[in-house]
Amino acid sequence: MGNYDLTNFKRLVNDLGLTLSDRQYEQFIRYYEMLVEWNNVMNLTAITEYDEVIVKHFADSLSLVKAVDKEMLIRGSLKEGDDRLTIIDIGTGAGFPGIPLKIAFPELKITLLDSLNKRIGFLNAVIEELGLKDIESLHGRAEDYAKKGQLRESFDFCVSRAVANLSTLSEYCLPYVKVGGSFIAYKSEKTQEEVQAAKNALDKLGGRLVSCEEFNLPGTDLYRTMVNIKKEKATPGKYPRKAGTPSKEPL
């Protein structure tokens, strides 16, 4: 591991109420190094400075603990003796939040979905290099894998940091969530208006807004909201609509 100062990183992790082992910090650092290396040949992120990455990508990804029970994530199951918790990360890009969640909570079973094949190459290289198990990356569009017989309604949680309004994002993400599970949207701004505008979409898709956890990333003035949407009934088969429609004509 290169000569990286972990002081601020450890403080961020502690502020989230988490404890990581030396091995987990090593995995994060190697992930950071690979992100920068690969970013030289393909566009993965505009944020490459170490201090910025640990705040805006790593700590941000781990802030799922603001919306989901931390002990459940550590255990990797809803309760003792249950099946493994399954999470799908839609539009994962360079692996956020899915890979940081897998490093910090190794018991989780994680699926990364992205529409760009070269990003999948990067994700697979990271998974192999870090020795991560029970995590897979899939190349494809959110609309396609949400079809019946694919991954529809097969996850406890869907997470996404993708940039889209909540109505559009819910149409892509809620079809993946089991009834009783949740879709958690990572948002980087105040979301009251967006949440109001998404009410109709949530009704149609079988979701209900449970909470909006608003906070600043530890030690910064960067504003974040975690929108927690519970799946209360099955999503009608006609959703998601064909590629492009959810963003052009939000429900």
Image: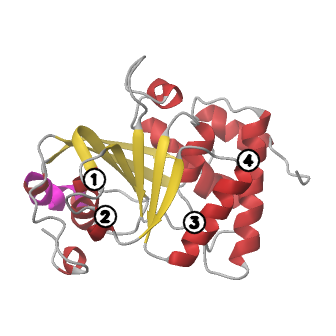
Residue 247 seen: yes
Q: How far apart are marks 4 and 3 (CA)?
A: 15 Å
How many neighbours does mark 3 have within 10 angstroms: few (below 14), some (14-19), or many (20 or more)? many
The residue shown at (53%, 49%) is 135
Q: Determine the secondary structure under disc 3.
A: loop
Disc 3 marks which residue? 94
Task: Relative to 238, say whether 128 is above or below.
Answer: above
Q: Which of marks 2 and 4 is nearer the N terminus?
A: 4
Q: Do the residues labelled 4 and 1 touch (CB within 8 Å)?
A: no
Disc 4 marks which residue? 27
Q: Determine the secondary structure under disc 4.
A: helix
How many neighbours does mark 4 have within 10 angstroms: few (below 14), some (14-19), or many (20 or more)? many
Eye-nearest disc, 2 or 3: 2
The kind of residue on which mark 4 rests is: Gln
The residue shown at (42%, 27%) is 77
Q: Position of residue 195 (x, y in %)?
A: 22, 55
Task: Relative to 69, say whether 142 is above or below.
Answer: below
Q: Earlier in the sequence, mark 4 or mark 3?
A: 4
Eye-nearest disc, 1 or 2: 2
The residue shown at (43%, 32%) is 84
Q: Determine the secondary structure under disc 2.
A: helix
Q: Which of marks 1 and 3 is nearer the N terminus?
A: 3
Q: Do the residues labelled 1 and 2 touch (CB within 8 Å)?
A: yes
Mark linked to residue 176: 1
Task: Relative to 147, say whether 151 is above or below.
Answer: above
Q: Distance between the residues labelled 1 and 2?
A: 8 Å
